[in-house]
Image (cartoon, grey):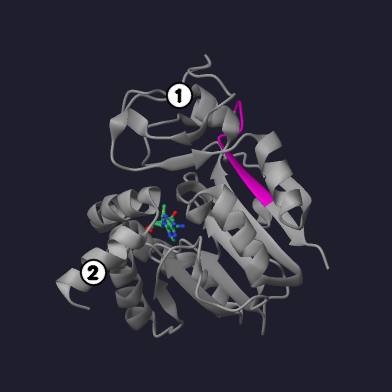
Amino acid sequence: MSAAEATASMLELPEHVRRNRIAWDKWAADYADPGAALWAQDAPTWGIWGVPESQLRMLPSDLAGKDAIELGCGTAYVSAWLARRGARIVGIDNSEAQLATARTLQRKHGLEFPLLHGNAEAVPYPDASFDFAISEYGACLWADPHRWIPEAARLLRPGGRLVFLVNSFLLTLCVSDIEGVAASTALQRPAFGLHRIEWNGGGEVEFHPSHGEWIALLRRSGFEIEELVEAYPSADAATRYPFVTLQWARSWPSEEVWKARKRG
Ligand SMILES: C[S@@+](CC[C@H](N)C(=O)[O-])C[C@H]1O[C@@H](n2cnc3c(N)ncnc32)[C@H](O)[C@@H]1O
């Protein structure tokens, strides 16, 4: 693609997708080593505390031969875990730099699956292409829920499952505006009207619907909600992220997993 074509295609993206692409292309280098470590793990662990799969049960037990997509795959370690369980996985991500790491790790591990550079709000696959869709701090945090949830519903077959892990809404209310300062026990912002957040006027855009908004949107998009699981990190868990302490995360949920099934 020429430079002029690249600029034109960038301008076609929604504003938040364009801004998040610039941010993630810049941050990708910081995610290469953590991504490599997670690729090397056979047993999945999730989120910023590495909560084990046995607690969160993000992955269906019967993935072999199933069509699956990871929405906002980053370095694609989640996709790798699915591929090793026999799923026909496709990863899509908005950052070419993140996908470059993913491709390097594919070669290192000898595990090939399609990686698409694109916006999870508009995936170039036909309706009903997948049995399972997953996102861990990917599209579920950085894409507009009013676009990516209906898109996930379109992509899934009747009975297909959507599972995603994000910051809990409670943590979003308590987290500090000051970078590097951990969440307190006091509410820092109103819950009503939150939805979209631009921390510290940085370039990037996050989306944090309330529980009521998630439920209404999932149901309106054709999903039945099966479970909302609140992650509880172990006493020796650690994170490289400064925005929440282990003491906080063992007192209140800092991360939550939504599990939904497309109505058949
Ligand atoms: C935190 S990473 C998620 C991957 C991995 N699970 C992780 O936690 O490192 C966030 C990823 O979401 C991607 N992303 C952000 N907005 C997206 C969008 N609209 N469509 C697809 N991917 C998106 C970013 O490019 C980034 O690679």
Helix, strand or loop at mark 2? helix
Residue 192 occupies quadrant: top right
Who is closer to the viewer here, 226 or 129?
A: 129
Disc number for residue 242: none
Residue 7 or 115: which is nearer the viewer? 7
- Report whether the residue tagged 1 is closer than 8 Å to ligand 1: no
Question: What range is drawn magenta here?
Answer: 251-258
| Number of other residues with Cα within 10 Å of mark 1, as a class: few under 14, some 14 to 19, many 20 or more | many
Quarter of the rendering containing residue 215 = top right
Q: Is residue 175 magenta?
A: no
Reply above or below: 177 against 121.
Answer: above
Q: Given the image, on which type of amino acid does mark 2 rest? A: Ala
Q: Position of residue 176 (x, y in %)?
A: 40, 23
**Looking at the picture, does residue 86 appear above or below residue 168?**
below
* Ligand 1 location (quadrant): bottom left
The CA span between labels 2 and 1 is 39 Å
Q: Position of residue 236 (x, y in %)?
A: 50, 39
Q: Quadrant of the C terminus?
A: bottom right
Residue 152 place in picture, x, y as percent: 62, 63
Label annotation for residue 6: 2
Query: In the shown orientation, is residue 244 left or right of residue 258?
Result: left
* Mark 1, residue position: 183
